[in-house]
Structures are given as structure tokens and as C-alpha cells.
């Protein structure tokens, strides 16, 4: 499709800083893509001199693919990614001081777990704090505390100044506000007590940071703040980045936070070549620190900047665009002119229900009729977008499970993920085999009472007679008993296997949750669902659940299922259980989509339904993000008004629609309490039409395509693939998490230590013998009580050997942890080279470390890896004369023996072609490996190729 004049203008304008205000459906991605192509092809920018940030990894991979399609140049070295990954690169390549040369980034759920685990180590008197009525439960407190911490980090607030500013106020305004606004009735607390509380809350920030440091964790905001410190405190690093990145492009500008803007605008400061694309009215991530007011500062910071508006809407029918514009107008919002480019129109309907349940039923009947009357091809064409799926979606889910079983559905995002059938079934079965006596906690997560209830689920899919519902299932250890009662052979087999597992666990009195989870997947023969394309999402969701389990056991306990369930059932709504921040990958295109509006950002659907438009639900009355209000002058930019964000959410939801928008409300909660219509609905009421069951008025012409399916895969996946394609599929495609095995942990310690040593050497510092102990401490990963001591001396010796070797061989450091990547048919393979240096002979050496002896180093496929890295570096004009697979465990190493020839790239490309073909064709044959290899495989219990499994 040709670009419109304004799109072309936006894509090709480079004379000054540029702000592109892009309304919904205005082809923003096309403009960004075209801009990338224009800069490379017409303006001759080297791809690696362009820095483009986007909001999600998925979006960046799609843009990368489209740019690649538009240019003949190799763009694998162009940075297109999230601000977080950019910050991670800065820290890894330019160092984050001695504290953070290596770390694990805490995503939403893991951070929640981490703070929960350490809540009593933060120095806050929790009982005193709970006198404030807003802070009743630990999970609420954790959300408030982490929001408070983020605000401090994102705005670079000095906590000591904040403390004195609040506590030294003559009139104690802030303190009194807290008392007036928060205090529970009947609770006595005086100003001095509140001051002590405030002090402890502010002080807890430093304790939280110290705890993260101790455990080598970083939250997303600290990732940014450390990257900021690196560039702000080191002129050489700043100059290197400014020289490297000649053009800065920022997508989703309305969702940027103050610190991200400081980092990116500092990099653009030298050349003033910057373009930002976004729409203030679509900003919905205030709870993550996004501040769309930065939009207004752009023009102040760049007075010679240009603004281009993209108001043509190519996505939605005319009425949808008109009503969305009307909404903004009636809410007195500033907006660019939105012009519908589609000429077809359709009324905006609403469905009313007397009660909440009736409204949900009405909506589901409507969806069912759409399919039955062939107005839509599949349920995947419809999205029900909730303000809060957790709180407003339960009637929908119950009805779908009971009365609308023929509508397959997918739940995305937030903690509603836990409501998916397969997750409920697995939680129930875990409780069953672990003989969890506390049924109430299982019930909270699963809604099932007995095994009987789970048989007719999506996952087990077996009809069982009602007369069997009160059987004592635990007694059956013999298939014949069940078969004689009329059960199928397959189901009898499963029940017996479950009971054997249950007995085994109770005999052993201890079992690891993750292992048992995989055994259950084996019992259920979960991979047989691969045959049915509409069941693939079950496997993906279980893969994600395995990560959630691993996150829990990484911070808590490998065996405490009760604790795991208790934590899961109390996870607050805004802790995201999705894989990546709000990234939704629709894996079942035939299933009805139920999601929070936040998850629908960037997506579009032929039919959109916005339910629960009642006064208290939407707009939602927002509580403040933090425990105490931070005085305005501490913020880098004016904070954004939360009510505006509610309006934005509604606007975003409406504008996801291509063909048919339906709103829904009810008059009474199921409890019988009356409610009123939402003010958002009211302000559009004169433009809406009550749906009268006349389906002839609905015309759906769009359909939910799969979109660009671009995959991003780490290089380590290739080594797994070469070992066993099936294992690759389970691990990397479906996302089943494997516990790190012991030798991997040892390898990681070496790796961490060598990175620290290399960083010191890059600054021309020698590594002294007495520093080894500290390097070892900073690099250490817990190997388990017994092995910590046993392996410490051995690892220390390995580190010393490396120091002696590298100190003699090194002339100059060329790169540490340099990212490399390669694109093949929508698949981008990326990796990081461990070390690149010039040796005393003037050769450029590419080095990779392996915790092996020389004799078996090739078992790791390091030769392929080095060939791949060397080739990627050479394409980036980096000379590589020699590649070395450094065998860490080799005590008397002649380095020439560890050299790998990287001249012949043929072999590696053969493997890559095979790899890409397997992924594209979804065929992973040749998977069976020798029994020995399989015996150590974490997936053996559920792998269909491993006969010794469950
Ligand atoms: S059990 Fe064996 S065949 Fe199955 S995934 Fe693991 S290594 Fe591959």
C-alpha cells in the first residue's frame, strides 16, 4: 500500500527533531518502518547508527522484519528493541560499576515474590502501617511499596531530601493528609507515630535496593537507573553512545517514563536527530510510570522541532471513528482531527442486562449468534475487552464453562491467566497428588471439588456419568476396577497413574513441584493436543505456568505447594502473569478473546465488546499509586491525571474495533444492589443504538489474521536443537522452563567472574591476587549447601588460571558481551559473544568460555557457535582472526589446542537452514536421543519419545 502524503512526509522528514502524533489505526508502524528504510536507503545511515525503541519485543521484531524487507542492507546490527533491553546492553557492554556486571531482571511476578519474601526485612512496622485503612493486606502493601519505589527511581529522587522535605514541614501538611485520608475509624495514631512510619517507608527504599543487590536482582526501573548512571557519570561512554547512534527513533512515546526519556534524549543530545511517535490519548500505562506529559515537553526541549499529525484512520468503520472522536470532544480532550478512511459504516450497538449475569449472558448469546449466522468466521474475530477481567469477568467465564461450552475462549494477561481451564486442572491435580488437605485453597484456584469435576474439562476431555461423582477416586490402583465400572481404558489409565503418583509422593514425604508438574503433564499426555490446532494454546499456557512455578521455587521453596497456592490466590490484579510485559500472542486464532484493555494495546479485532459499563467499574475510581504523596517538585515532569488515563482506556478499547463495536451495561449487581450507567456510556448515549436482535444490520468484513509471526530465538536454542529438536520445541517454542542443572550454574559463576575480570582489564586495571576472593563472592550462585564449599576452591583455581592466561595474552579489549544476530525467514537468532580482544601478536581473538575439559569441549557445539558469532561480527565489519573455545576446567592449556577454525561458514548455515525449516514446518523429527542423554532431560516425564517416562 502506498503511503499517504502525511505518512510520507513523516517518514522522510529529517531536518529537525520530529514529533509524530499518530491517531489509532493511522499506519504508525508503516511510517516507522518506512522511516527506517528511508534513513538507510536514501540518507545512507549505517543501520547500526540507528536506535529505535518500541514498547514490546514483539513490536520490535515485526518492525525489524518489515525494514529488512524494504532494504537490501543487512540490518541485524541495528538496535530495535525495548528501552529495557537497550539499558541492559549499556550495562553489559559498558559496565554498571562493580555491583551489577551480572544480574537477573525481575519481571512483575518475580518482583512481587521477592518483595513478599522480604517484606519483614524492609524495616517497616507492618502492624503500625496496617492501621492505615488503605493498607490491609500484605499483597496490597507490596503493590503500594513497589509503586512508591518505582516513582523514586524513575524520577531520580534523592530519598534523604524527600524524607527531610516531608518530615521537616512546619505545618506537617503531608503527615496530616495521610492521617485524614487514610486512617481507619477508631484507630488512634498521632503525628509523631505517623512520622516514624513515613521515615521507615522512605528508608525501606534503600533496604530494598540493598536486598536486590545482595541477591543480584534488578527491577526494570533500576535497570534504567543503572544505565543512566553509566552514561551520566562517564563522558567516554556517553560520547561512544552519542557517536554510535546518529538517529534516535522512539515508538509509543506516550508510554515513556521520565528516566527513559532522560536516557534517550541524552543520547540524541549531540546530533538532535530524533523522531518520537505516539498519541497522548492512548497512554494507559501510568501504573508502570508512563508519563504522557513528556509529550508536551518535547516541543519545549526542541524549540526548532516539527510536528506532523497522522489522523487518517484506516482501521475502523466510519461510525466507530466518529464516536471515538466524539468521546474525546465531550470529555474536553485535546485531539488531532481523526478522519475515517473507510466509507462503510455501522451503528454502535449496546446490550443491556437487568443483572450483571443477564448482561453477560446477553453478550455471549450475541457472540454465539454471530458465528451461527455466519457473520463471523471464527470466535477469534471477537474480543471482549474488560476494564478488569479479574473482577468483572467471572460471570463470563462461569457461563462459558457451563452454558456456552461450544465457544472456545482464551484468557490473556493479568492474573486472569490462572482462570484458564488447563491451569485450573493442573492446580487441582497438583493438589490431588500432593494430598493437599487444605481444600479451600485449591478451591480458590480451581473451582473444582473432585476429580469427577475435572474430567469433562478442555484438558482431560472425558465424559463421565454423573452416578460416579461421589466415588472415592483415591482408592483406584487397578485399571480393571475402573474399566468394569464403565470407564474408558484411557481414562482408567490416567486415574491409576495419578493415584500411583499420589502414593509415591506421600511415601517419600517430599517432592518438587516442578518435577511433579511435568509428571502430571506426562500422565495427561499433554503433547497429544498438538494434533488439534485449537488446543495448542493449552500447551503454551502450561509452558508459561511452568515458568511461574520456577519463579516461585527460585524465591521460595521447591516443595511447598500450599505456600505456592496461597501466593497465587492472593496475587494482586496488576501483577502481570503474562510472559512479557503485556505482550499478547494470540496462539488460538479460533478462540474468543477475553482480555483486559491493557493487553489489547496494539491489537485490532473485527468485533469488539466492552462490557460492564457501570458507574463504579468504568471509569474506575483510582487509588493513588503510592503510600504517600511525593511533593510535586520532586517529579522530573508533572504527574499525569489518573482520570485522563481511564478515558484513554475507553478510547483505546473502542478504537481496537474494525467493524462492529458493542457496549454493554447492567442495572443491578448479582447481589441485588443497584448501580448506574457509566459516565462514559452516558456521554455517548445519543449516538448508540440498542441491539434489537436484527443481525442483518451487522456486517463484518475483516477477519483476525495471524499477523506477522516473527520469532526471536537465543543462540543457545540452536545448541539444544542440535542435541534434540524435541527438547528445543518443548523448551524454546512452548516455553517450558527447565531447572538449571548443576554444571550450568558452575559455568555461570565462571562466566560472571570472567566478565568482571575483562571489565577491569578494559579499564587498564590489573587484577590482583587479593581481588580474586571478592570477584568470586560477587559472581557466586548458590550451588547448594554441600557443594558451595566443595566447589569454591576448584572454581577459584579456574579463575586464577584465567587471570594468568589473559593477563599475558591480552593487548587490548575490543568488546565484552557484544550482541550479535542474524535473520533468516522471519526468525532472528541472537547471541552475545563472551569476549573479543586483541592479543599480543596483534590478532583479534573471539573467545567463548565453556566449563569443560578440552577433550569434550566440542560436545557443547561451541564450534558452531563461534562460527556463527565470527560470521555475524565480520558482517558488522569487525575483524576476527582467531576463535578460541576456552576450556575452563583444563589445568594445563596450550591455547593453540583450543582454537576453532571459523573460515568455513558452510556447516553452520546448513544447521541454521535445517533449524529454520523445522520451525517453519513445525516438524521436529529425529528427536530421539540415546537413553543416557534422555535420562538427564528435564522433560523426560512428558516427552513422547522417552519410553522410560511416566
Ligand atoms: S526426553 Fe530425550 S527425546 Fe525427549 S526431549 Fe528430552 S532429550 Fe529429547
Image (spheres, rainbow, N blue to C red):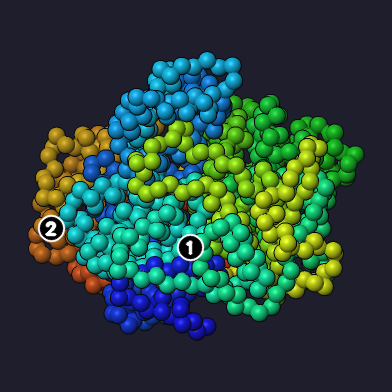
Residue in view at x 62 percent, y 64 percent: 326
Where is mark 2, residue-wise? 812
Q: Tell me the element at label 1.
A: loop
Name the N-terminal-most of marks 2 and 1. Answer: 1
Q: Position of residue 411 (x, y in %)?
A: 65, 52
Q: Position of residue 561 (x, y in %)?
A: 59, 32
Determine whether, in the image, residue 707 is placed left or right of residue 873: right
The image shows residue 440, relative to residue 719, as above or below, that is above
Residue 295 position by quadrant: bottom left
Relative depth, front residue between 871 and 318: 318
Where is mark 1, residue-wise? 279
The image shows residue 186, relative to residue 664, as above or below, that is above
Determine whether, in the image, residue 29 is placed left or right of residue 339: left
Q: Tell me the element at label 2.
A: strand
Residue 55 position by quadrant: bottom left
Residue in view at x 13 percent, y 43 percent: 767
Q: Position of residue 842 (x, y in %)?
A: 10, 64
The Cα atoms of the two marked residues, 2 and 1, are separated by: 46 Å
Alpha-carbon neighbours of circle 1 within 10 Å: few (<14), some, or many (≥20)?
many
Residue 16 position by quadrant: bottom left
Q: Nearer the viewer, mark 2 or mark 1?
A: 1
Residue in view at x 29 percent, y 33 percent: 161
- Is residue 60 visible from the viewing direction of this image? no
- Is residue 650 visible from the viewing direction of this image? yes
Q: Are marks 2 and 1 in contact (CB under 8 Å)?
A: no
Relative depth, front residue between 593 and 290: 290
Amino acid at each position: 500500500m502506498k503511503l499517504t502524503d502525511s505518512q510520507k512526509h513523516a517518514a522522510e522528514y529529517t531536518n529537525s527533531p520530529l514529533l509524530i502524533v499518530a491517531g489509532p489505526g493511522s499506519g504508525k508502524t508503516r511510517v516507522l518502518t518506512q522511516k527506517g528504510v528511508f534513513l538507510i536507503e536514501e540518507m545512507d545511515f549505517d543501520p547500526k547508527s540507528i536506535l529505535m525503541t518500541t514498547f514490546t519485543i514483539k513490536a520490535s521484531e515485526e518492525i525489524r522484519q518489515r525494514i529488512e524487507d524494504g532494504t537490501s542492507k543487512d540490518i541485524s546490527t541495528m538496535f530495535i528493541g525495548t528501552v529495557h533491553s537497550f539499558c541492559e546492553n549499556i550495562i553489559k557492554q559498558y559496565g554498571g560499576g562493580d555491583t551489577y556486571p551480572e544480574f537477573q531482571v525481575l519481571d512483575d511476578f518475580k518482583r512481587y515474590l521477592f518483595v513478599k519474601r522480604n517484606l519483614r526485612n524492609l524495616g517497616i512496622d507492618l502492624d503500625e502501617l496496617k492501621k492505615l485503612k488503605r493498607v490491609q493486606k500484605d499483597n496490597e502493601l507490596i503493590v503500594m511499596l513497589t509503586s512508591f519505589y518505582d516513582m523514586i527511581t524513575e524520577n531520580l529522587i534523592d530519598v534523604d531530601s524527600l524524607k527531610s522535605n516531608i518530615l521537616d514541614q512546619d505545618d506537617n501538611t503531608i503527615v496530616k493528609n495521610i492521617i485524614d485520608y487514610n486512617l481507619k475509624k477508631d484507630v488512634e495514631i498521632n503525628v509523631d507515630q505517623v512520622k516514624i512510619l513515613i521515615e521507615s517507608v522512605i528508608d525501606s527504599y534503600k533496604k530494598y535496593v540493598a536486598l536486590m543487590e545482595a541477591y543480584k536482582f534488578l527491577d526494570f526501573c533500576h535497570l534504567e537507573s543503572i544505565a543512566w548512571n553509566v552514561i551520566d557519570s562517564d563522558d567516554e561512554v556517553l560520547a561512544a553512545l552519542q557517536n554510535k547512534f546518529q538517529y534516535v527513533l522512539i515508538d509509543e512515546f506516550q508510554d515513556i517514563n521520565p528516566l527513559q526519556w532522560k536516557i534517550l534524549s541524552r543520547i540524541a543530545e549531540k546530533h538532535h536527530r530524533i523522531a518520537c511517535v505516539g498519541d497522548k490519548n492512548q497512554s494507559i500505562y501510568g501504573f508502570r510510570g508512563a508519563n504522557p506529559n513528556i509529550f508536551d515537553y518535547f516541543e519545549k526541549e526542541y524549540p526548532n522541532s516539527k510536528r506532523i499529525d497522522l489522523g487518517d484512520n484506516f482501521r475502523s468503520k466510519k461510525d466507530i471513528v466518529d464516536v471515538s472522536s466524539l468521546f474525546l470532544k465531550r470529555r474536553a480532550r485535546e485531539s488531532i482531527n481523526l478522519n475515517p478512511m473507510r466509507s462503510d459504516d455501522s451503528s454502535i450497538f449496546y446490550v443491556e442486562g437487568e443483572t450483571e449475569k443477564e448482561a453477560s449472558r446477553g453478550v455471549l448469546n450475541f457472540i454465539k449468534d454471530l458465528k451461527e449466522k455466519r457473520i463471523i468466521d471464527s470466535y477469534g474475530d471477537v474480543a471482549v475487552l474488560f476494564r478488569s477481567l479479574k473482577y468483572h469477568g467471572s460471570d463470563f467465564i462461569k457461563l462459558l464453562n457451563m452454558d456456552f461450552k461450544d465457544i472456545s475462549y482464551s484468557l490473556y494477561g493479568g492474573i486472569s491467566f490462572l482462570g484458564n481451564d488447563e491451569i485450573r486442572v493442573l492446580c487441582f491435580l497438583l493438589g490431588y497428588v500432593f494430598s493437599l488437605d487444605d481444600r479451600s485453597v485449591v478451591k480458590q484456584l480451581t473451582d473444582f471439588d473432585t476429580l469427577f469435576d475435572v474430567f469433562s474439562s478442555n484438558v482431560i476431555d472425558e465424559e463421565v456419568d454423573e452416578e460416579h461423582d461421589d466415588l472415592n477416586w483415591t482408592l483406584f490402583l487397578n485399571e480393571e476396577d475402573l474399566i468394569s465400572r464403565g470407564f474408558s481404558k484411557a481414562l482408567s489409565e490416567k486415574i491409576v497413574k495419578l493415584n500411583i503418583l499420589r502414593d509415591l509422593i506421600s511415601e517419600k514425604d517430599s517432592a518438587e513441584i516442578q518435577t511433579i508438574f511435568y509428571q502430571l503433564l506426562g500422565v495427561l499426555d499433554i503433547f497429544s493436543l498438538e494434533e488439534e490446532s485449537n488446543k495448542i494454546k493449552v500447551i503454551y499456557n502450561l509452558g508459561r505456568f511452568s515458568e511461574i512455578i520456577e519463579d516461585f521455587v527460585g524465591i521460595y521453596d521447591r516443595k511447598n505447594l500450599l505456600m505456592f497456592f496461597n501466593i497465587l490466590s492472593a496475587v494482586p490484579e496488576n501483577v502481570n502473569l503474562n510472559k512479557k510485559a503485556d505482550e499478547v500472542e494470540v496462539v488460538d486464532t479460533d478462540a474468543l478473546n477475553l482480555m483486559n484493555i491493557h493487553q489489547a494495546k496494539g491489537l485490532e479485532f473485527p468485533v469488539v465488546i466492552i462490557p460492564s459499563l457501570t458507574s463504579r467499574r468504568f471509569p474506575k475510581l483510582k487509588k493513588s499509586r503510592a503510600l504517600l504523596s511525593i511533593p510535586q517538585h520532586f517529579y522530573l515532569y508533572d504527574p499525569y491525571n489518573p482520570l485522563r488515563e481511564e478515558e484513554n482506556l475507553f478510547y483505546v478499547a473502542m478504537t481496537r474495533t474494525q467493524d462492529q463495536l458493542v457496549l454493554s451495561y447492567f442495572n443491578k449487581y448479582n447481589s441485588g444492589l443497584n448501580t448506574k450507567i457509566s459516565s462514559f456510556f452516558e456521554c455517548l448515549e445519543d449516538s448508540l443504538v440498542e441491539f434489537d436482535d436484527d443481525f442483518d444490520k451487522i456486517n463484518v468484513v475483516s477477519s483476525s489474521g495471524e499477523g506477522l509471526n516473527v520469532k526471536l530465538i537465543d543462540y543457545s536454542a540452536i545448541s539444544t536443537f542440535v542435541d534434540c529438536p524435541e527438547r528445543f520445541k518443548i523448551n524454546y517454542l512452548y516455553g517450558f522452563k527447565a531447572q538449571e542443572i548443576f554444571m550450568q550454574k558452575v559455568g555461570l559463576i565462571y562466566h560472571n567472574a570472567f566478565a568482571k575480570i575483562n571489565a577491569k582489564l578494559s579499564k587498564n586495571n590489573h587484577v590482583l591476587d587479593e581481588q580474586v576472593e571478592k570477584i568470586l563472592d560477587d559472581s557466586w550462585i548458590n550451588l547448594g549447601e554441600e557443594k558451595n564449599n566443595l566447589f569454591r576452591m576448584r572454581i577459584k583455581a579456574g579463575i586464577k588460571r584465567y587471570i594468568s592466561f589473559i593477563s599475558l595474552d591480552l593487548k587490548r579489549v575490543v568488546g565484552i558481551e557484544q550482541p550479535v544476530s542474524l535473520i533468516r525467514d522471519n526468525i532472528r537468532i541472537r547471541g552475545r559473544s563472551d569476549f573479543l580482544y586483541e592479543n599480543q601478536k596483534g590478532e583479534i581473538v573471539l573467545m567463548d568460555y565453556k566449563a569443560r575439559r578440552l577433550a569434550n569441549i566440542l560436545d557443547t557445539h561451541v564450534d558452531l557457535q563461534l562460527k556463527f558469532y565470527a560470521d555475524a561480527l565480520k558482517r558488522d565489519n569487525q575483524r576476527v582472526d582467531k576463535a578460541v573455545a576456552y576450556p575452563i576446567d583444563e589445568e594445563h592449556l596450550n591455547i593453540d589446542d583450543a582454537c576453532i577454525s571459523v573460515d568455513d561458514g558452510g556447516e553452520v548455515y546448513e544447521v541454521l537452514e535445517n533449524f529454520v525449516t523445522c520451525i517453519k514446518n513445525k516438524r521436529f523429527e529425529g528427536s530421539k536421543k540415546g537413553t543416557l542423554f534422555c535420562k538427564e532431560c528435564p522433560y523426560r516425564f512428558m516427552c513422547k519419545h522417552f519410553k522410560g517416562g511416566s
